Image (cartoon, helix red, strand yellow):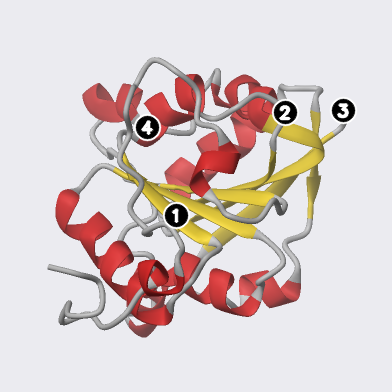
């Protein structure tokens, strides 16, 4: 089915642009930004993008930046693709793969302006916490892909996980804690809206690389 005849409506291909969902040709070679985006712009990455609520709004309101969403669940990544096509966004792409693997092996070194990690799975049982995305070792992996002065933005509704996030960054001298810009804090994810409606506290912080 062509993009023009798709129920989602005309998307990037209708304007001669690549699609939103980028099919990986290899999981062993780093991504090449010029192959994903038609225009070179600063790149921001959301690890575990869900259905793309944050990414879509970011790409719409910040056309001067390119945004990549990383998500392993097929249903969610299809939503990102469908909604992004409908909006005709040329600065949004998505890849289907585990966020931790993408960070360690696929994101190009020294190329990302910001990493966004919002409401990652808290894996609350002690025996499962080794699966958490943000744990010892994460700050080093993030620093590898960030540009000098790049930032990591974090949000969670899980107080224990938030404590762990702060602890793993506190012991890494390559970062210092910074405030989340007001405009960014006001850009809510779908999960965040649900949690706020249920009266749950939202914890957020950000770290800037000192390189």
Q: Quadrant of residue 14?
A: bottom left
Q: Quadrant of residue 11?
A: bottom left
Q: Is residue 8 left or right of residue 193?
A: left
Closer to us: 97 or 24? 24
Name the residue beneath numbered marker 4.
132
The first of marks 1 and 4 along the sequence is 1
How packed mark 4 is, by other alpha carbons closer than 10 Å (few <14, some 14-19, many 20 or more), is: some
Q: How many labels sit on residues?
A: 4
The first of marks 1 and 3 along the sequence is 1
When the figure is inspected, residue 145 is found, relative to residue 49, above or below; the finding is: above
Q: Secondary structure at mark 2?
A: loop
Q: Which residue appears at 62% of the width and 51% of the height?
A: 44
Please state which of the two labelled residues, at mark 1 or mark 4, is closer to the viewer.
1
Name the residue beneath numbered marker 2.
110
Q: Position of residue 129 (x, y in %)?
A: 32, 28
Closer to us: 142 or 162? 142
The first of marks 4 and 2 along the sequence is 2
Real-space CA distance between mark 3 and mark 2, rounded to the nearest whole angstrom? 10 Å
Real-space CA distance between mark 4 and mark 2, rounded to the nearest whole angstrom? 24 Å
Real-space CA distance between mark 1 and mark 2, rounded to the nearest whole angstrom? 19 Å
Q: Secondary structure at mark 3?
A: loop
Q: Position of residue 36 (x, y in %)?
A: 50, 46
Name the residue beneath numbered marker 3.
211
When the figure is inspected, residue 65 is found, relative to residue 200, above or below; the finding is: above
Name the residue beneath numbered marker 1.
93
Q: Position of residue 79 (x, y in %)?
A: 25, 66
Real-space CA distance between mark 1 and mark 4, rounded to the nearest whole angstrom? 24 Å
How packed mark 2 is, by other alpha carbons closer than 10 Å (few <14, some 14-19, many 20 or more), is: some
How packed mark 3 is, by other alpha carbons closer than 10 Å (few <14, some 14-19, many 20 or more), is: few
């Amino acid at each position: 089915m062509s993009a023009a005849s798709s129920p989602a409506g005309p998307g990037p291909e209708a304007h001669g642009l690549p699609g939103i969902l980028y099919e990986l040709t290899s999981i062993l070679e780093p991504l090449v930004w010029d192959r994903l985006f038609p225009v070179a712009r600063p790149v921001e990455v959301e690890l575990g993008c869900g259905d793309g609520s944050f990414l879509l709004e970011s790409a719409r309101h910040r056309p001067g930046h390119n945004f990549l969403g990383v998500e392993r669940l097929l249903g969610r990544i299809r939503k990102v693709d469908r909604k992004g096509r409908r909006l005709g966004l040329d600065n949004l792409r998505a890849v289907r793969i585990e966020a931790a693997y993408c960070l360690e092996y696929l994101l190009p070194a020294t190329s990302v302006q910001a990493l966004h990690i919002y409401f990652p799975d808290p894996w609350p049982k002690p025996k499962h916490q080794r699966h958490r995305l943000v744990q010892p070792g994460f700050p080093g992996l993030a620093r590898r892909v960030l540009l000098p002065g790049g930032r990591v933005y974090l949000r969670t509704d899980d107080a224990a996980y938030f404590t762990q996030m702060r602890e793993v960054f506190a012991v890494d001298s390559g970062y210092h804690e910074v405030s989340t810009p007001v405009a960014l804090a006001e850009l809510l994810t779908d999960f965040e809206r649900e949690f706020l409606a249920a009266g749950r506290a939202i914890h957020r912080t950000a770290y800037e690389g000192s390189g």
